[in-house]
Amino acid sequence: MERKKILFVCPYPFDEAPSQRFRYEQYLSALETEGFQFELAPFLNLRAWKMLYKSGQSFQKLFWLVLSFIKRFFLLFQLYHFEYIFIHREATPVGPPFFEWAVRFIWKKKIIYDFDDAIWLEDPNEKGSLKARIKWKSKVKSICKWSYKVSSGNDYLAQFAKKFNERVVVNPTTINTDYHKEIKVSKREKNVIGWTGTHSTLPYLKIILPVLDELAKEYDFELLVISNQKPDFDVRYMRYIPWRKSKEIQDLNQMDIGIMPLTNDIWSQGKCGFKLLQYMAIQKAVIASPVGVNKKMIQESGAGYLAETKERWQSAIAKLLMDPSFREDLGKQGQEYVENNYSVNSNKSTFLSLFQ
């Protein structure tokens, strides 16, 4: 019997982007076990990806972008032996959905359309930029209509997709809990409040800096920031660690408390709570803004606090700073919740159902 073949069409190179790693890359071995074959087709190759976020070098960036569009066009002539085309977010970063249209109406292939943000909206962090103006946000609706199935990261995203397609699967972003159990670190002298995320989400961290400034007058703690880019702010109690895949869990384990502040807007409603999952998976107590799926995760897990106001953030952080045994209890509850609801093992059948 011939094995079914899947082409993963994605923005970034393999093992370089969190959204890809935790949406589908960690399920590739499960697909092989189930008898599928697959190939990966990133828009950017590794060299282009590394150059894109460096300052300057505009000509080289333009060269790689044009080359990437050309490669994407020629990919259309290589689709004949694939049964499923899994598209993560978009086939091209800007412009109309020509590739997706061709896959559906010329090749008549089954599109699995996967997204984990409210990408039909303008990202507040890109507002007014050239990138935002040429994104062609309306294509998300069209791709949903053309898809065999839509894979959405949470209920909010699924509600949007269901306006255009009945075959919508809530496929949450998940954690490989086996991997997250591997490394432990010794106790620190100071309590560590931790935050991790890509450079595009650093503005959310700024929201609670006034709260931390006030707490620093009374409590001795450290703010650990793990990101692929150094923050554009500096406070005396902050320590920055560049994100490193090889040290990811070891670095996260330096935290005692994990935080996830967000603005309360329609863009943030689409967030999939991944920071919370990372913290809870390694038994860290959490505090988060009650926005989108954050509220559900903390209420169901009992792993921490929801904080909407400055006063609530301050009291929640103070409580956890002063009570390490309570933090430990919350962390255990969070880890159990992730294992049962947001782990690769618990979600494997849902992911595989996309290809049925």
Image (cartoon, helix red, strand yellow):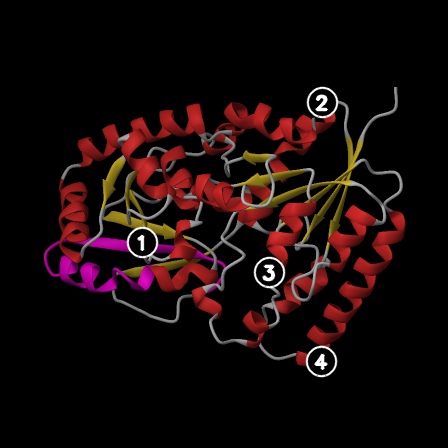
Give me the C-alpha separation between circle 4 and circle 1. 37 Å
Percent from the top left, x then y, of residue 268?
40, 54
* Numbered disc 4: secondary structure: helix
Give me the C-alpha separation between circle 1 and circle 2. 39 Å
- In the image: residue 339, left or right of residue 261: right
Residue where numbered disc 3 is placed? 138
* Numbered disc 1: secondary structure: loop
Percent from the top left, x then y, of residue 73?
83, 60
Query: What's the residue at 33%, 31% (across, down)?
Result: 334
Give me the C-alpha separation between circle 2 and circle 3. 37 Å
> Depth check: 96 or 71 in front?
96
Q: Quadrant of residue 205?
A: bottom left
- In the image: residue 239, left or right of residue 91: left
* Numbered disc 2: secondary structure: helix
Position of the N terminus by quadrant: top right
Q: Is residue 233 above or below residue 244?
A: below
Question: Was residue 218 drawn as part of the magenta stretch in this picture?
Answer: yes
- In the image: residue 308, left or right of residue 37: left
- Mark 4 or mark 1: whose residue is earlier in sequence: 4
CB atoms of marks 3 and 1 within 8 Å: no
Question: Was residue 199 drawn as part of the magenta stretch in this picture?
Answer: no
Residue where numbered disc 1 is placed? 261
Q: Quadrant of residue 286?
A: top left
- Identified by mark 2, the residue type is Thr
- Mark 3 or mark 1: whose residue is earlier in sequence: 3
> Depth check: 181 or 6 in front?
6
Percent from the top left, x then y, of residue 285?
28, 38
Residue 33 - label = 2
- Mark 3 or mark 4: whose residue is earlier in sequence: 4
**Residue 331 appears in the rendering:** no
